[in-house]
Structure formats: C-alpha cells, structure tokens
Amino acid sequence: MKHLHRIIAPALLAAGLHGTAHAKLVEQQFDLPVHVANAWGKVVEQPIRVTVYFNDATPAPRPIVLINHGRAVDADGRAALGRARFPEASRWFAERGFLVAVPTRIGYGVSGGEDVEDSGSCNNRLYPPVFRAAADQSLQLLDVLRQRDDVVKDRTVLLGQSFGGATTVTLASLNPAGVVTAINFAGGGGGDPKAHPEQPCSPVQLRRMFAGYGQTAHVPMLWAYTENDRFFGATLPREWVQAFRDAGGQAEFKQFPPHGEDGHLLFAKFPQVWQPVVADFLRRQGFDIKD
C-alpha cells in the first residue's frame, strides 16, 4: 500500500458496542490514485478520498463492505457531497464485524475533478460506460483493501445507494475476486424528482443495461426499493430486476412501503427499516449477523 497517502491518523470514536465500554469505532481516511475512462473514452487520473471504518472490539481479519454513494442531479449538489461516509450504516456494519470502505468518487466533494459520470442527453443516455467508470474506481479500491492484513480476502459484500446501487450491480457483473454478495439500494440513473419525478431519463436503456448485467453476474443479490421513490417510481425497478433475472442474474427484490417524502432516501434516513432485512439476507449468505 505504498502508493496510498494517509490523511489522518485513525480516529477513535466511542461506540459502546453491546455493552463493551472500551469498544471503539475506528475511522481512517486515505487518498487512492485511480484512473477511469468517461463515456467518450477520455482517461482521467487522480486520487479519490476513501473513508474506512471498523470496530476495534470485533476480531480481525474482517470481511469488507464497500459502500458506493449516489449522484446529485446538478454540479453544485455533487460538489456539496463533502466526504461520503454513511455514518449510521457504517457504524451498524462495523459493529457486526465488517471493515467498511466508502469511496468519494471522482467529481464529488473532497475528491473533486471532472464529471466522469456524465452520460449525455436525457433521451439517449450512455449508461454502461459511466457506471463502468464508477465501478472501476471500486475495483481499484478492492485491490488495495485486499492487501490489508486485517481483512478477509474472500468474503466481500458490495453495497450502493441510487447511482451507487446501479454501480454495485455493475461491479457484481464483473465478478471481482473475493466478492460473495451484493446489495442494491434504489439503484438506477437519470432520475430527477423535481424536473421529471418517477420518470428517469432513458428507462429502456437502463432496462437493457440491467439485463446485460444479469448475463454475467454470479453472486446472489438483494435489490431494495420503496413504493414512493421519487427518482424511479414503483414500477420501473420491478421491470429492471425482472430483466436482470430473466437474463440469469440472482436477485431477491424487496419493495418497502412509502417512507418520508421520498423513499429513495431510505438507506440514509431510515436505517432501522432496512437493517433487519439486510441482516436476514446476509445471514443466509453465511455471515454471522446479530440484530
């Protein structure tokens, strides 16, 4: 890991894990040099910020959970992301024995840089190459994480929300070494809850993309959406998962009832709702998950 630049020494945050007074949530940051190609073939090379969490009361080596963030509809929103962290979800996974890695991708927040995830006009979105650009950053991160002495190298879980959810499906279709399962929260692209609620750009291309992923993805997956998703609606996600399954992919589909004004935000805003479902799914994949 000699090419990594550590930003800060590990921070110890009181966790109080299961009544253990001395348990600590350890938070680390580092910059990871990555290279990707955008939808038009331009290669971009730059570092991205990665945040890592684990609980020091849990035994090492730990399985990895890699969490990918979503995509704001405008440049200001992408710049305002700051550092992707998902603190509630990260703590929950860390308390259950995982090492959690959250990359802030190129074009967002503290990582900055150009928008390598621009997929073109709304009527003709170039989805596969931009999700591959996002996935390639995670592939490079996984290569580095698997060099750590404190990780289990063959029990990785992929997870993502919104654009990050579709990125997770992309990653699963590439079958990275050591990945055993993947969880897609509200995955898709091209949504805008204000300009065209529940009607994302180029939905046919998204369906075709997910069908293509189903042809090559081998690991079991969980796809989680809500009935009041303002980005993608209630119907399109069912069509996408069916296309994925029809092509050979393994995916359980869970559609939660409405939550908040926009259920698209379920992963970040309503963790108590999805945690039992995810715990059950991971137990069935062989993980010892406590409620």
Image (cartoon, rainbow, N blue to C red):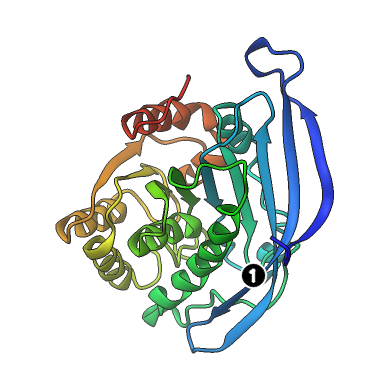
What residue is drawn where x is 45% and y is 32%?
274
Secondary structure beneath disc 1? loop
Q: Is residue 216 left or right of residue 40?
A: left
For the residue marked with disc 1, what is the amino acid? Answer: Ile
What residue is drawn where x is 61% and y is 38%?
90
Asked whether the viewer can see residue 225, the reply is yes
The residue positioned farthest toward the front in the image shown = 149
- Mark 1 Cα shell of 10 Å, populated few (<14), some (14-19), many (≥20): many
Residue denoted by label 1 = 106
Point out residue 291 in the picture as x, y percentages from the top left corner: 48, 19
Q: Quadrant of residue 94?
A: top right
Residues 133 and 208: in front is 133
Residues 269 and 69: in front is 69
What residue is drawn where x is 74% and y is 56%?
30
Q: Is residue 36 left or right of residue 280?
A: right
The residue positioned farthest toward the left in the image shown = 246
Point out residue 236 in the picture as x, y percentages from the top left corner: 29, 56
What residue is drawn where x is 73% and y is 63%?
2
From what the image shows, is residue 64 above or below residue 145? above
